[in-house]
Amino acid sequence: MKKVLCICAVGLLLGFFTTSCNKQCQCKTYVNGALSSTGDPFEVETGKKCSDYNSSLTLLGITTDVKCKPTF
């Protein structure tokens, strides 16, 4: 029983430390499928994921995509 409690305690601590860290995202901008620029990593707002910053816009036949991924 003590081993189970220890394993649960360690699992809770690991979960706490991994969720308490500030997460960073890095976004890349693509114009018509070709990489145009890579932005600097930034802190994610509370309650958001990196994929929430993804976007796509087509104007006058030119498609611009922003794709964000977490950095480690």
Image (tube, rainbow, N blue to C red):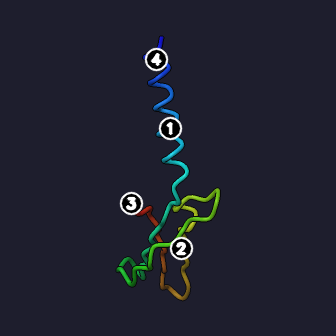
Q: Earlier in the sequence, mark 2 or mark 3?
A: 2
Between the residue at mark 1 and the residue at mark 3, the CA separation in whole angstroms equals 20 Å
Of residues 28 and 14, the one nearer the viewer is 14
Q: Residue furthest top?
A: 1
Helix, strand or loop at mark 4: helix
Question: Tag count in the figure?
Answer: 4
Between the residue at mark 2 and the residue at mark 1, the CA separation in whole angstroms equals 39 Å
Q: Position of residue 24 (x, y in %)?
A: 48, 65
Circle 2 residue: 56
Helix, strand or loop at mark 2: strand
Q: Position of residue 61 (x, y in %)?
A: 49, 85
Foreground: disc 4 or disc 2: 4
Specify the quadrant of the image occupied by residue 3. top left
Q: Which mark is residue 13?
A: 1
Q: Amino acid at mark 2?
A: Ser
Q: Earlier in the sequence, mark 3 or mark 4?
A: 4
Q: Amino acid at mark 4?
A: Val
The answer to the question of whether label 2 and label 1 lie on touching residues, with beta carbons closer than 8 A, is: no
Taking the spot 62% from the left edge, 65% from the top edge, the residue there is 45
Helix, strand or loop at mark 1: helix
Circle 3 residue: 72
Circle 4 residue: 4
Taking the spot 53% from the left edge, 73% from the top edge, the residue there is 56
Q: Position of residue 42 (x, y in %)?
A: 51, 72
Taking the spot 48% from the left edge, 80% from the top edge, the residue there is 63
Q: Earlier in the sequence, mark 1 or mark 3?
A: 1
